[in-house]
Image: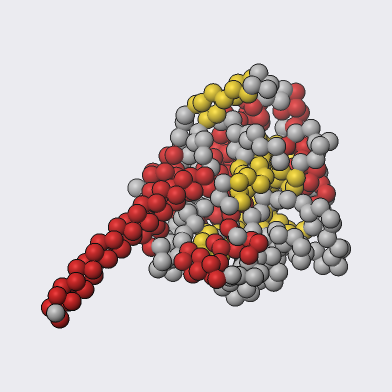
Amino acid sequence: MVTRAQDIPHVDYVAQLTRHLASVPGFRSDWHKRGSIAIVIRLVLPDGEGKYPVFDVCRYGMNKTPASLVQAVHGFLGAPEFENGHMQILFIQRAKYPKDPWSGHIGFPGGKREPEDGSDKVTAERETKEELGLDLTDVCRYVHLGRLDDLCAYAMFTNIILAVSAQVYLQIVQCTPEMTLSAEVASVHWIDFGQVLKGIDRPASPFSPGYRAIPVDIASRMFPKWRESQPLWYRGFRCLFGKFYYTVLPLEYTEKDSIVRTAQQVPVPDELEMTASQPDLAAGRSGELKDLSWKYGDIRFSSDRELYLWGLSLCILSNLVDLSLPVPPASLNPSYTSVASPWPQMDRYLWGDVNFMLNAAHRLVWGPYRRKPWFIRVQQRKDKAANTTTRLVGNNRDYFQAHFITLRAAFIVSCAFKTWILWISGRAISRLVHKAFQWIQ
């Protein structure tokens, strides 16, 4: 029997997320350039249904261990008032600056780690305080549930730009403190978790009517120095390889749960903050996706009713959903792989065979049972500098790494097959021409 993800109480997702964050350690990348983001979750009671439950701060504060955290959170979530409560996640839209490559993107509050930050958790709390005015260190309002696996932002598929650590927080009071948006943030939105669960109950197939994607020019990504002059070889490469189409998860928002900064924007700082939002989506007010310019000058990443999440931010959200599922993936929609699926697609006409191989291997390589917490494989990683050993649980490849490895194999097979077809066709044409000359003579 198929279980609809939207029919499961939201409080069960929060409880399962707490258990998994406490029991399954998050992977930490060794990359030196790091950033942190904060995923803030709250439970909202239906209008007029009882008094908001009280979190036992003193009980947890006396013994801050993973076990005591799970016990305190479960005692808080076990209140009957939360039975029909709605889980919401905090998203931001970056302010628009002409020189900011992440201008206008949807993501989570956060930024790059500074030398004075003692940990990734401190970075996430400091950046959230600077951008939104929310003090996540206030133990009377927020509880730190744990961290997700680090994800890396890539350039040219394999070159790492930044390792991003996602810290998860639960708001334990009914009213969110008043937020003061900095010049780096254009708007803040509390998104109902049911919008995310739609990606589980109604997964979209590539290039189907319900499929939403962002077209990204491959030539501009691989050869940015030539995007202005566009020599003849560049144009040929562009025509041959076309574009990548990145999956988009549309998230509907309401004015009641949104804050838009109306103050005049200040000049962009010299050093732009790096967030977990990755550049790749464009949408007009009608919700139609448009091609991207290299610097994303006039590109819209939201409409008048939806936010468009993609890239690294969508992968982080997908990891959060994996740890939140209170039921086995086998009991969900058979077509479900992840809320970030399908993998980025190539041109459907030029490279349809590559897409076919990618999509055929997608569930095998990146299916629910190949990811945490359902894929349990413990590895020992030795850090020679610190002389320590770290336990890694789960898949040792992230979304983009798995995609690139599969894409590389599919592309080689496709090129080899097309070369063989051209060789066979060339031989057949040569024989026909030779016979034609013999017949003429």
| Residue 239 on image: x %, y % | 49, 69
Q: Is residue 271 visible?
A: yes
| Residue 253 on image: x %, y % | 64, 63
Q: Residue pushed farthest front?
A: 441
Q: Nearer the viewer, residue 274 or 95?
A: 274
Q: Taking 57 as reference, is 41 above or below it?
A: below
| Residue 398 on image: x %, y % | 53, 42
Q: Identify the residue at image location x=63%, y=65%.
A: 226
Image quadrant assignment for residue 48: bottom right
Q: Taking 18 as reference, is 308 above or below it?
A: below
Q: Identify the residue at image location x=34%, y=47%.
A: 1
Q: Identify the residue at image location x=67%, y=45%.
A: 162
Q: Nearer the viewer, residue 231 or 364?
A: 231
| Residue 394 on image: x %, y % | 50, 33
Q: Nearer the viewer, residue 155 or 209?
A: 155
Image quadrant assignment for residue 388: top right
**339 sits to left or right of 1:** right
Quadrant containing the C terminus is bottom left
Q: Identify the residue at image location x=73%, y=50%.
A: 274
Q: Taking 322 as reference, is 98 above or below it?
A: below
